[in-house]
Image (spheres, grey):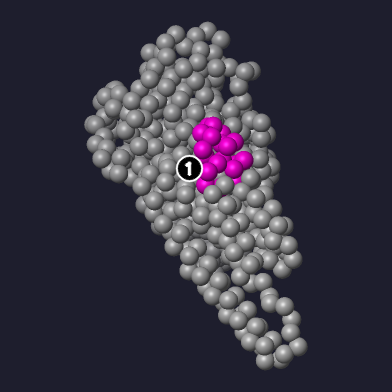
C-alpha cells in the first residue's frame, strides 16, 4: 500500500502541469532507451502492439515487490528508517528518469517523483507508529484486548489507504486529461488537396474473404514506436523548424503547412520489426506537402547527406538526402485516410517516406527537420545495432487461409499481399508442397509505392500441405528464400504456411 501511496501521490501532482509526468512513464521511457535490442524484438514478437502495456505492468510488478519487501516487511516490522530509505531510492530513480528525458526536461519535472516519495515516507511513519505493538503483559485479558486493538487499527489503516490511493490517482489522471490534443484535432478542417487522388480503381481490392482491405483503416493501422503514451501536441503554438546544413532556416506553423500546396498519395509503410508473414505493414491515403519542395525552399547545402526528423519526445529518424532528390513522394503529412492524423499516428504532423522502413523515416509528432551528415549524427536506432540505411526489402505474405487452417477439398482461394515500395511488384507466385511455382492473379495498384493484393485458386486435395509464396519485383529481382531476422535492416525469407485439407 505504501508503494501505492507513492504512485498515487506522484500521479496526482503530475496532473497539474503538461510537462510533468507519472514516474512510471518516465522510468518506462528510460527502460525503452536502454533495453538491449534482442529484448525489444522479443517484446514486439511476444506482445505485438501490447508491448508498452506489458512494460508498464512489469514496472508496476517490480515496484510492488520492492515496496512489499523493503517498505512493508523491513520498514514496518523492523526499522522504519530502512523503509524510508527504500521510498527515497524509488523517488530518486523517478526523478532521474524525469530529468534525463530525450528531449530535455525543466528542472521541476522531478517534482511528481519527489512528491510521491515524500507522501509515501510520511505515510510510512504514521503507519509504523499507529501499528506499534503495546508492551507485553501477563494479564491475558489485557493482552487479548491489545491484540484486538492492534488488528482493528491495522484493518482501519489498510482500508483507509485502499480507499485513498485509487481516488487520488484518478484525480491526477483527470487533471492530466486536460492536456490532450483531442480538442485541437477535432477543430482541424483539412483543406482540399491541390493534387487529389481519384477513388481506387476497380480491381485494386480483390475482395477475397480473409484478405484485409487495400487501404488500412486508421483504427487497424499498426503502431510501433518508442512512446509509452502518445505525445499530445496541439496545433495552437505548433512550429516545425527546418534547420542545419541549409541556406535559410524555416519555421512553419500548422496553419502555414495547411496553406501550402497539399497532395494526396497512397503509400504503404512497413516496420523494420516485421517478421516474415508479419502484420506490421499497412497502406493509407496520406495528405501533406512534398518534402522535396520544402527542402528546396530551404536550400540544401553541399555536403549534407542525411535528413533527420526529430519528434517532440526527442526520438529521431534519419535517411539519405538522395531519397528526397530522386522524385519519390516523401511527405510532411497532416492527414491520413481523409481525416487529420490520429494522435497515435503523429498528430499534428509526421513524415511519410515510401521505400524506407519506419525507423529510418516515419517520424511522428514531428517538430524539427535537420540537414546533417551520417558521419556527424546517428539517429535513434543506429547505436542500438540497426543499419543507418535500410531500403524496404521485397516481401510477400499469405493472409488466407491462415496457418494450420482446415479447409474443404476442392478449389481453395489463397490470397495475400506483396510489396516493395518505390520499385513495385511485377508478379507473385505460389508453390504447393515445394512443387512448381505457379502465377497468382494480381490486383491493380495506384502506384509502385503501395502493396498489391494477389490471389491464387488452388485445387486442393485431402492431406497436409505446405503453401509458399514469393514475389518478383518490376526490376526482375526474385524474393530470396534465405531467412534473416529484422536486425539490422529488416527480415527476409519466404512466407510458408501449413494447411489441412479435409
Which quarter of the picture shows residue 497? Answer: bottom right
The C terminus, quarter of image: bottom right
- Which residue appears at 39% of the width and 54% of the height? 174
Name above or below for residue 247 compared with residue 157.
above
Q: Position of residue 451 (x, y in %)?
A: 45, 39
Name above or below for residue 40 compared with residue 366.
below
Q: Position of residue 93 (x, y in %)?
A: 64, 45
Name above or below for residue 278 compared with residue 389.
below
Nearest the viewer among 334 and 61 is: 61
Instruction: Residue under label 1, please give it.
Output: 20
Identify the main secondary structure in magenta.
Answer: helix
Nearest the viewer among 222 and 499 is: 222
User: Do we see residue 321 in this rendering?
Assistant: no
User: Do we see residue 402 in this rendering?
Assistant: yes
Q: Is residue 238 magenta?
A: no
- Which residue appears at 33% of the width and 25% of the height? 253
Nearest the viewer among 436 and 62 is: 62
Q: Position of residue 6 (x, y in %)?
A: 56, 56
Q: Which residues make up the magenta segment?
A: 94-113
Q: Is residue 97 magenta?
A: yes
Circle count: 1
Relative placement, left or right, of 373 versus 424 is: right
The N terminus, quarter of image: bottom right
Amino acid at each position: 500500500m505504501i508503494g501505492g501511496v507513492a504512485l498515487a501521490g506522484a500521479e496526482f501532482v503530475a496532473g497539474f502541469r503538461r510537462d510533468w509526468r507519472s514516474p512510471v512513464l518516465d522510468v518506462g521511457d528510460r527502460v525503452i532507451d536502454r533495453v538491449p535490442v534482442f529484448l525489444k524484438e522479443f517484446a514486439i514478437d511476444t506482445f505485438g502492439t501490447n508491448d508498452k502495456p506489458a512494460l508498464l505492468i512489469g514496472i508496476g510488478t517490480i515496484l510492488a515487490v520492492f515496496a512489499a519487501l523493503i517498505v512493508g516487511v523491513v520498514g514496518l516490522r523492523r526499522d522504519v528508517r530502512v523503509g524510508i530509505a527504500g521510498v527515497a531510492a524509488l523517488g530518486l530513480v523517478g526523478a532521474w528518469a524525469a530529468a534525463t528525458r530525450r528531449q530535455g526536461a525543466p528542472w521541476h519535472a522531478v517534482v511528481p517523483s519527489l512528491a510521491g516519495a515524500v507522501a509515501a515516507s510520511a505515510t510510512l511513519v504514521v503507519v509504523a507508529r499507529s501499528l506499534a505493538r503495546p508492551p507485553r503483559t501477563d494479564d491475558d485479558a489485557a493482552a487479548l484486548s491489545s491484540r484486538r486493538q492492534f488488528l482493528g487499527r491495522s484493518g482501519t489503516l489498510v482500508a483507509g489507504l485502499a480507499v485513498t490511493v485509487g481516488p487520488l490517482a484518478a484525480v491526477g489522471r483527470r487533471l492530466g486529461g486536460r492536456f490532450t490534443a483531442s480538442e485541437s484535432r477535432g477543430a482541424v478542417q483539412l483543406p482540399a488537396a491541390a493534387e487529389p487522388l481519384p477513388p481506387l480503381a476497380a480491381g485494386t481490392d480483390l475482395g477475397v474473404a480473409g484478405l484485409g482491405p487495400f487501404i488500412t483503416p486508421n483504427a487497424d493501422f499498426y503502431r510501433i514506436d518508442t512512446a509509452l503514451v502518445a505525445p499530445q501536441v496541439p496545433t495552437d503554438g505548433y512550429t516545425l523548424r527546418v534547420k542545419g546544413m541549409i541556406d535559410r532556416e524555416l519555421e512553419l506553423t500548422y496553419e502555414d503547412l495547411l496553406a501550402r500546396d497539399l497532395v494526396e498519395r497512397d503509400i504503404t509503410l512497413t516496420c523494420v520489426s516485421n517478421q516474415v508473414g508479419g502484420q506490421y505493414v499497412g497502406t493509407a491515403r496520406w495528405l501533406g506537402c512534398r518534402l522535396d519542395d520544402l527542402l528546396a525552399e530551404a536550400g540544401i547545402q553541399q555536403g549534407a547527406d542525411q535528413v533527420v526528423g526529430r519528434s517532440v519526445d526527442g526520438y529521431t529518424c534519419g535517411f539519405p538526402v538522395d531519397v528526397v532528390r530522386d522524385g519519390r513522394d516523401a511527405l510532411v503529412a497532416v492527414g491520413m485516410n481523409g481525416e487529420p492524423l490520429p494522435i497515435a499516428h503523429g498528430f499534428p504532423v509526421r513524415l511519410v517516406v515510401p521505400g524506407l522502413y519506419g525507423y529510418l523515416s516515419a517520424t511522428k509528432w514531428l517538430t524539427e527537420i535537420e540537414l546533417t551528415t551520417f558521419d556527424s549524427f546517428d539517429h535513434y536506432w543506429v547505436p542500438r545495432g540497426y543499419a543507418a540505411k535500410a531500403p524496404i526489402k521485397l516481401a510477400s505474405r499469405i493472409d488466407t487461409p491462415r496457418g494450420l487452417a482446415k479447409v474443404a477439398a476442392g478449389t481453395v482461394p489463397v490470397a495475400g499481399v506483396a510489396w516493395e515500395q518505390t520499385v513495385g511488384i511485377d508478379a507473385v507466385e505460389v508453390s504447393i508442397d515445394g512443387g512448381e511455382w505457379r502465377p497468382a492473379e494480381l490486383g491493380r495498384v495506384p502506384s509502385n509505392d503501395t502493396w498489391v493484393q494477389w490471389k491464387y485458386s488452388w485445387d486442393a486435395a485431402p492431406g497436409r500441405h505446405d503453401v509458399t509464396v514469393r514475389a518478383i519485383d518490376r526490376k526482375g529481382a526474385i524474393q530470396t528464400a534465405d531467412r534473416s531476422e529484422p536486425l539490422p535492416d529488416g527480415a527476409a525469407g519466404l512466407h510458408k504456411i501449413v494447411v489441412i485439407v479435409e
